[in-house]
Image: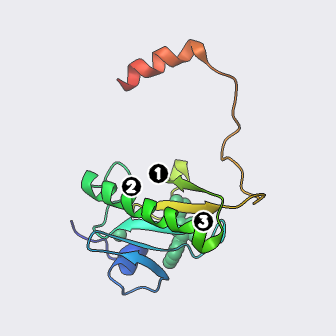
Amino acid sequence: VTEPDHCIFCAIATRTGPAEVVEADDKAIAFLDIAPATRGHTLVIPRVHAADILDIDPDDLAHVAKMAQSIAKRMPSALGADGVNLLNSGGAVAWQTVFHFHMHVIPRYLNDPLRLPWTPGEPQFDHLAEVAELLR
Ligand code: AMP
Ligand code: ZN
């Protein structure tokens, strides 16, 4: 896979760009988000460039998921976190702004101000079967 010339996360993966790295191995690297949602907000990326969830190699995805869990497990003792959100945005319409796949690992704290990104609505029993059929 060829790296795009101006990918900020490829620069971090090759250590030519600055980052507070918290874990790294041959396939993935985890570093702090520069504009954290909460204290300790971490991003985990594959070293090999992939734009998004559709593009990433499944083995790299599995590796990123395992590293995300490894970081999440440290958050209660290291930071006093009470919970964690894993989040990935795929595509601009889904709020993706950096087009090198990344998993957000966001530690959560009792009474922190974060809220769900959607407003839960009413159950839509009429439509579920139809949509499931499209996805099968
Ligand atoms: P997303 O909207 O899911 O694409 O998230 C991109 C995230 O990358 C945002 O939370 C940014 O704060 C973060 N970010 C952008 N540039 C950098 C950087 N150079 N180092 C660390 N985090 C970054
Ligand atoms: Zn990249």
Q: Residue at x 69, y 34 (%)?
A: 120
* Residue 57 image offset from top left, x and y in percent: 26, 54
Label 3 lies in ligand 1 vicinity (Cβ under 8 Å): no
Q: CA distance from mark 1 to mark 2?
A: 7 Å
* Residue 80 image offset from top left, x and y in percent: 66, 68
Where is residue 109, by image quadrant?
Answer: bottom right
Q: Secondary structure at mark 1?
A: loop
- N-terminal label among 1 and 3: 3
Q: Is residue 99 visible?
A: no
Q: Nearer the viewer, residue 118 or 59?
A: 59
Tell us which disc is closer to us: 1 or 2. Answer: 2
Q: CA distance from mark 1 to mark 3?
A: 31 Å
Q: Residue at x 65, y 65 (%)?
A: 37
Residue matched to label 3: 76
Quadrant holding the C terminus: top left
Q: Is residue 115 left or right of residue 105?
A: right
